[in-house]
Image: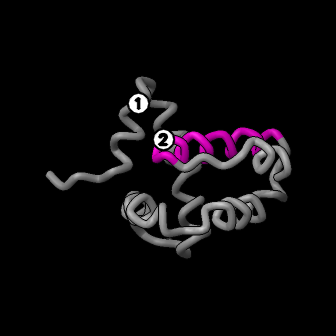
């Protein structure tokens, strides 16, 4: 079995619906960064592998810009997912950064 680093993140959740929702948010996040890809899980794994080499703030800004025309409640539901994902892999962005989006 091939180890996919994102598996450990999804394994922290017990509810299958949470996993489905988080995947549905994270796949478009990496698609904004890398361009649309067929294999969303592969892009997630690639992102994790490159995470500490990336300008994560810029990545989040790009994603935010791509969803900013959605309803405010939708945006405010998606950003905590991205934040949780990044924190799981030891990337902490200041609270002020998230507030100012």
Residue marked by disc 1: 12
Label 2: how many residues lie within 10 Å, few (<14), some (14-19) or many (20+)?
some
19 to the left or right of 68: left
Q: Where residue 81 appears, x then y in whole percent?
A: 60, 41
Residue at coordinates 36% horizontally, 34% vertically from top-left?
11
- Is residue 17 magenta-colored? no
Residue at coordinates 62% horizontally, 44% vertically from top-left?
83
Above or below residue 77? Residue 14 is: above
* Residue range corresponding to the magenta coloring: 73-90
Which of 53/80 is in front?
Answer: 53
Q: Are marks 1 and 2 in contact (CB under 8 Å)?
A: yes
Which of 46/40 is in front?
Answer: 46
Residue at coordinates 58% horizontally, 70% vertically from top-left?
33
The first of marks 1 and 2 along the sequence is 1
Q: Where residue 70 appears, x then y in whole percent?
A: 81, 53
Q: Where residue 7 appears, x then y in whole percent?
A: 34, 44
Numbered circle sitting on residue 88: 2
- Is residue 77 magenta-colored? yes
Above or below residue 18? Residue 29 is: below
86 to the left or right of 14: right
Which of the 4 image quadrants contains residue 39? Answer: bottom left
């Amino acid at each position: 079995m091939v180890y996919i680093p994102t598996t450990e993140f999804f394994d922290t959740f017990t509810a299958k619906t949470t996993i489905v929702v988080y995947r549905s948010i994270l796949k478009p996040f990496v698609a904004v960064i890398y361009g649309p890809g067929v294999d969303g899980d592969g892009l997630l794994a690639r992102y994790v592998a490159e995470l500490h080499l990336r300008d994560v703030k810029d990545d989040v800004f790009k994603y935010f810009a791509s969803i900013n025309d959605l309803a405010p409640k939708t945006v405010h539901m998606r950003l905590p997912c991205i934040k949780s994902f990044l924190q799981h892999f030891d990337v902490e962005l200041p609270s002020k950064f998230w507030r100012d989006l």
